[in-house]
Amino acid sequence: MNKIALLILLLMLVGSLTVLGQSRKYISQFSFFQSYYNPGLTGYEGSTLRGFVRNQWSGYEGAPKTMFFSGELDFAEMKGSEDPALMGKNAVGLNLLFDQYGAFKETGLVVSYASRVRLTAKHNLRLGAGVSYTNVRLDGTAMTVEQQADDVLSNYIGGFSDMSIVDFNLGLALTHANYYLSYAIHQVNGGRISSGDDFMEGRPVNYIVQAGYREALSSSLAISTNFFYRSQQDLPDNVEFNVKALFMDRFWIGGGHRIDYANNLQAGLVFDKFKMGYVYEFPTNGSYLMSGTTQEFMVVFNLFRKNERRQPDEVLIW
């Protein structure tokens, strides 16, 4: 498949959103990157450094590629609190995402802050807010034929154009050591604060729900299940979930499903100070996505605490 044919397929897959210079970012291991989707969950698992690389539709030239890095600081953990997830009150985070899809390259930066209110002996209400900065670069030499015919994008054929957007994210979460339920809004202002070339008509508001439950069944076996829902005006709803089994607090296996799109198989390892995971994702039979597979690698590094149980029923992964 040549490059032009591939990019036409990409255009068909993401519809009008690609014409506007945007794409939906998927993370199969979304349960390890909760704070990216909800600023209220910043610092939920303590002070960490996180990252992933996602190579979508492997083997196709011009296919989407995503890289993500983040850092979270829990102030209570920095001060030596025995249980910062419950006792702490404030946390900050920094998220950096690079995404390339067809003729577009996107760089996003989100600075977030979360504050916690203790409701009961085991429950917290978390509130968070984030400020996002996004730069989108359009390569006018790599457009598809349909993009070149677009009334807006045709003005940028043969050159390079940049557009920058500032927006806001808000989040609310109820958390417990064994479960959480959260709701967030991304791009609250709809991309109205922008500068540079005007090849995008705003950025639609995203509504995001996340939930998870985990339990230690014995000293050598624990389970974790997570749910994700995202709604955006100009795209179908995004619904996905995963289930994982953790053995001996050292390695996990699991699987996930993105409704109407893809299935995935997951595996990972837990070390004293960090976790690393791998996902192999493939489209469902009824999906309109191309047949190429997706691979995703992630790592989470703890800045202060070790990956070990502080309570007999504690689970080390989501």
Image (cartoon, rainbow, N blue to C red):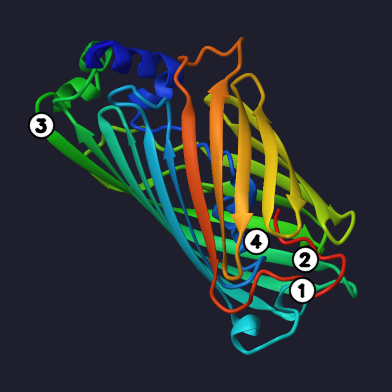
Tag 2 and tag 1, C-beta contact below 8 Å: yes
Task: Give the x, y percent position of residue 67.
Answer: 39, 47
Report the residue marked by disc 3.
159
Residue 312's disc is none
Label 3 to label 2: alpha-carbon separation: 49 Å
Task: Give the x, y percent position of residue 300.
Answer: 54, 60
Among numbered discs 1 and 4, the one appearing first in the sequence: 4
**Relative vertical location of residue 105 with respect to residue 299 in this rendering, above or below:** above
Label 3 to label 1: alpha-carbon separation: 51 Å
Bin the neighbour count of mark 3 within 10 Å (Cα to Cα): few under 14, some 14-19, many 20 and up. Answer: few
Quarter the N terminus occupies? top left
Label 2 to label 1: alpha-carbon separation: 5 Å
Label 3 to label 4: alpha-carbon separation: 40 Å
Check disc 4 and give the amino acid type. Leu
Q: Nearer the viewer, residue 8 or 152?
A: 8
Label 4 to label 2: alpha-carbon separation: 10 Å
Q: Nearer the viewer, mark 1 or mark 4?
A: 4
Check disc 1 and give the amino acid type. Val
Among numbered discs 2 and 1, the one appearing first in the sequence: 1
Bin the neighbour count of mark 4 within 10 Å (Cα to Cα): few under 14, some 14-19, many 20 and up. Answer: many
Check disc 2 and give the amino acid type. Leu
**Relative vertical location of residue 259 with respect to residue 207 in this rendering, above or below:** above
Task: Give the x, y percent position of residue 40.
Answer: 64, 61
Question: Which quarter of the picture shows residue 209?
Answer: top right
Among numbered discs 3 and 1, the one appearing first in the sequence: 1
- Number of numbered discs visible in the structure rendering: 4
Report the residue marked by disc 2.
125
Report the residue marked by disc 1.
117
Relative placement, left or right, of 157 versus 82 is left
Check disc 3 and give the amino acid type. Gly
